[in-house]
Amino acid sequence: MFLGIDIGTSGVKAILLDERGAVAAQASAPLTVSRPHDLWSEQTPDDWCAATDAAVLTLPADMRARVQGIGLAGQMHGATLLGADDRPLRPAILWNDGRAHAECTELEAALPSARAISGNIAMPGFTAPKLAWVRRHEPDLFEQVRTVLLPKDYVRLWLSGDKASDLSDSAGTLWLDVAARDWSEDLLAATGLSRAHMPRLHEGTEATGTLRTATALRWGMAAVPIAAGAGDNAAGAVGVGVIADGDALLSLGTSGVIFAATRDFRPNPAGAVHAFCHCLPGLWHQMSVHLSAASCLDWAAAATGLGIPELLGAAEAAGAAGGPELFLPYLSGERTPHNDPHIRAALLGLSNDTDPGRIAAAVLEGVAFAHADGLAALAAAGTRIERLAVIGGGSRSRHWGSIIAAALGVTLEYLDGGEVGPALGAARLAQIAVTGASLADACPRPATLAEVAPDPALAERLAPKLAQFRAAYGALKTI
């Protein structure tokens, strides 16, 4: 058995992978996000550890006893600031926090080579600008910082006592020389930090340490190795076999991502495309990132008083492109292609005939249109995608898939176990770290359950709404 743990934004998920490579059990525990001010998004780091403990202990004890290794995946970019005692100095600043917009501009002005080194435009969601914000607004606290860890790596510290990270997650800090797969002294210095503040770097398939004896006893397992793991998107890619140049996926979780594996480093910072290391040696990846995806469903469910299943049913009954309603899904700002933390969502075109079903339909379409913008940014970077494996909670809705396929002009593949997400990839990385298994053996592509090809008639009906969507962003930005 191999244990995969995913430190998400809304919860921690734990899965057990059996010797045949099948998911034998899974459990989760919820997390909450604090938003004390506009643009802020924070979590208490110890809550990640408590939720991890709760999720793992929910798994069957007899299976836990057979675990040979642990892999970690997690939400990216979160700034977890530790003092000399390795305890958090403040709540972690999360990936969807937009407070450091000014610091991004100043960082790039202070270090004109920042984009060339990191391969990425400075965005408020990245870790480095957050530290620049803390340095300016909480200077006394900044002086106490001894270590900066990403969310999953704080959980690693709790599990094993090791300060380590993998390259895919670390690439999202804006402190990594992504082409060289190493920390950049210049980028660190631009935010007043050095290598001494950073964890050791590992490929995702390498072991970083072993489980503490006390935790092993509580969990009913041996002091097993812990793999470096991956950022959530790279781990999700491993889980569905996106491990070779040209493979691609669509993740419909809290946020939305189009992820394309590449054999070389292909940056395009001008298009707000993320170019990061993959969690596998010798591979990189590109991503278009949308800060709100399935979280838009949560918002719409709360706004209409419907549960998620009822909301999706109402949207399907209303029909795609069946009304004038238009939803811009910028609940937390947007990354690709706008890099705009200040933009906010909008629901336009309402009439006396607008009902919950038409609102729900507009929400599904709006998220699809945002991903169409992201796909266009990847195309501008030279990446052509014709097929996308779908993962994440949003993969459960084939109706939503038909809208996305038509809006993007690509075929979607629904894979067996695709809804399990990054925890599956984390478990597979643990398997490789412990057994030395090959990528082909440890990361097979799951069986295809269904394919959704673009419907030309639906694409034709959606096209004018996509044009309106793009025009609406410009109009909304002006106000």
Image (cartoon, grey):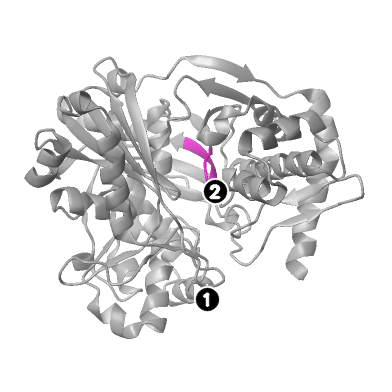
Q: Which residue lies most toward the bottom here?
A: 140
On the image, the x and y values in percent for residue 426 come to 31, 35
Is 143 on the left-hand or right-hand side of 207?
right
Camera-side residue: 374 or 120? Answer: 374
Q: For the image shown, how many numbered marks are present on the structure? A: 2
Quadrant the C terminus occupies: bottom right
Taking depth in this image into account, of 381 and 421 the one nearest to the observer is: 421
Compared to 284, does 347 lie above or below?
below
Q: Position of residue 150 (x, y in %)?
A: 32, 56
Residue in the image at 37% along x and 38% along y: 28
The Cα–Cα distance between marks 2 and 1, rounded to whole angstroms, is 21 Å
Q: On the image, which quarter does residue 134 sit in?
A: bottom left
Of the residues shown, which amino acid type is indicated by label 2?
A: Val
Q: Is residue 361 visible?
A: yes
Could you say which disc has been placed on residue 296 in the image?
none
> Along the polypeptide, which appears first: circle 2 or circle 1?
1
Q: Give the magenta part as a residue range.
A: 252-260
**Residue 459 on the magenta segment:** no
**Residue 96, placed above or below residue 321:** below
* Residue type, mark 1 in image: Ala
Label 2: which residue? 289
Instruction: Give the residue drawn at x 32%, y 56%.
Output: 47
Which percent across, then down, holds residue 56?
27, 37
The x and y percentages for residue 1 are 21, 24
| Residue 320 or residue 149, whichever sits in front | 320
**Disc 1 target residue:** 102
